[in-house]
């Protein structure tokens, strides 16, 4: 039985999708290559974080690839809440996809979500750089990239790939923003990347913990990184303890990353909002 619930939100209301999938990842194969999307999750059965920011970016991404889109946010919220109630799931991860050719038929997909494995936060993850992989339109969250990145193989034990430019600057992860702590500063690319929703929170909380420099760190400086991490809406902050086989710091999540993670969690808890009737 499929655990992924998929509907189209149309001017006439919700309609079941003409296909079934076992997960959001499985459903990617049915989604258009030309479109935009956003991905997030609920908390505490029906609370969301920065949903309007997700929808703002969805509309901005649509404009960047010439999709005329003005979301009916009330209808979208009601449709998501209805799907969650009907599914019987507690918390879900959801994807909102807008096809280029039929922007009035928004694809809403949900799957049960209980968080990510605790060990990735406790022990950190390993990453590699991907010098031959690039996003065609990095400032837009497109379905084209969703399909392209799924075709990039990663070696066993590697959690994520990191995109770099021709100068060797580390731009972002394949589905995350990337940060390095170098010379006591938090470094992250300020251009040529997708502005993250989790990144908005980090930019708010980080300056009270350490200086922030919106400038990409370079691969030649990887041995000098004292800490690093990635961020994403459903993952929050995930420590990176190794890049290209080079151990960062002592090989464990560092104190500044842990301090940022705690501040991120506190900010999140105080800014959750109810999906229903909000």
Image (tube, rainbow, N blue to C red):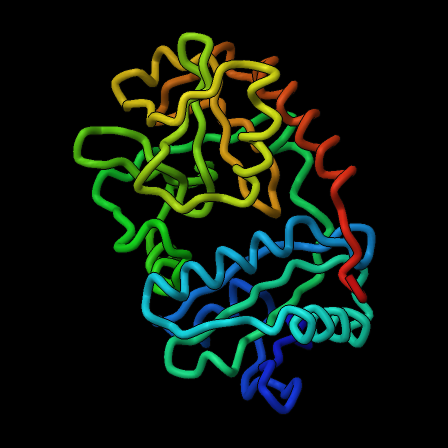
How many marks the image carries: the answer is: 0
x and y, in percent, of residue 205 in the image: 62, 26
Report whether 1 appears left or right of 245.
right
Rendered view: 107 above or below 65:
below
Rendered view: 66 above or below 214:
below
Report whether 99 appears left or right of 167.
right
Q: Quadrant of the C terminus?
A: bottom right
Front in this rendered view, residue 32 or 247: 32
Rendered view: 261 above or below 161:
above
Front in this rendered view, residue 37 or 249: 37
Furthest residue in direction left, as rendered: 166
Rendered view: 276 above or below 118:
below
Residue at position x 36%, y 50% in the image? 139
Report whether 100 appears left or right of 72.
left
x and y, in percent, of residue 136 in the image: 26, 55
- Residue 108 found in image quarter: bottom right
Front in this rendered view, residue 194 or 21: 194
x and y, in percent, of residue 113 in the image: 70, 55
Residue at position x 70%, y 25% in the image? 262
Q: Quadrant of the N terminus?
A: bottom right
- Residue 215 found in image quarter: top left
x and y, in percent, of residue 55 in the image: 56, 60
Residue at position x 52%, y 37% in the image? 199
């Amino acid at each position: 039985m499929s655990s992924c619930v998929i509907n189209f939100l149309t001017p006439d209301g919700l309609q079941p999708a003409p296909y079934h999938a076992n997960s959001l990842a499985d459903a990617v194969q049915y989604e258009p290559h030309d479109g935009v999307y956003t991905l997030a999750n609920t908390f505490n059965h029906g609370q969301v974080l920065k949903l309007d920011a997700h929808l703002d970016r969805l509309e901005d991404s649509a404009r960047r690839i010439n999709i005329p889109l003005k979301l009916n946010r009330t209808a979208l919220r009601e449709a998501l809440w209805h799907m969650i109630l009907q599914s019987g799931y507690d918390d879900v991860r959801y994807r909102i996809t807008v096809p280029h050719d039929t922007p009035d038929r928004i694809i809403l997909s949900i799957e049960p979500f209980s968080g990510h494995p605790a060990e990735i936060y406790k022990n950190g993850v390993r990453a590699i750089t991907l010098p031959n992989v690039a996003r065609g339109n990095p400032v837009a969250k497109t379905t084209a990239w969703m399909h392209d990145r799924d075709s990039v193989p990663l070696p066993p034990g590697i959690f994520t790939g990191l995109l770099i430019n021709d100068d060797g600057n580390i731009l972002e992860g394949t589905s995350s923003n990337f940060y390095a702590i170098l010379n006591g500063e938090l470094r992250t690319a300020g251009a040529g990347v997708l502005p993250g929703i989790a990144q908005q929170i980090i930019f708010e909380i980080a300056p009270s913990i350490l200086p922030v420099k919106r400038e990409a760190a370079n691969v030649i400086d990887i041995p000098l990184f004292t800490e690093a991490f990635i961020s994403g809406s459903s993952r929050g902050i995930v420590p990176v303890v190794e890049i290209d086989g080079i151990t960062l710091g002592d090989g464990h999540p560092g104190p500044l990353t842990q301090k940022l993670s705690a501040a991120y969690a506190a900010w999140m808890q105080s800014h959750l909002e109810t999906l229903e009737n909000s």
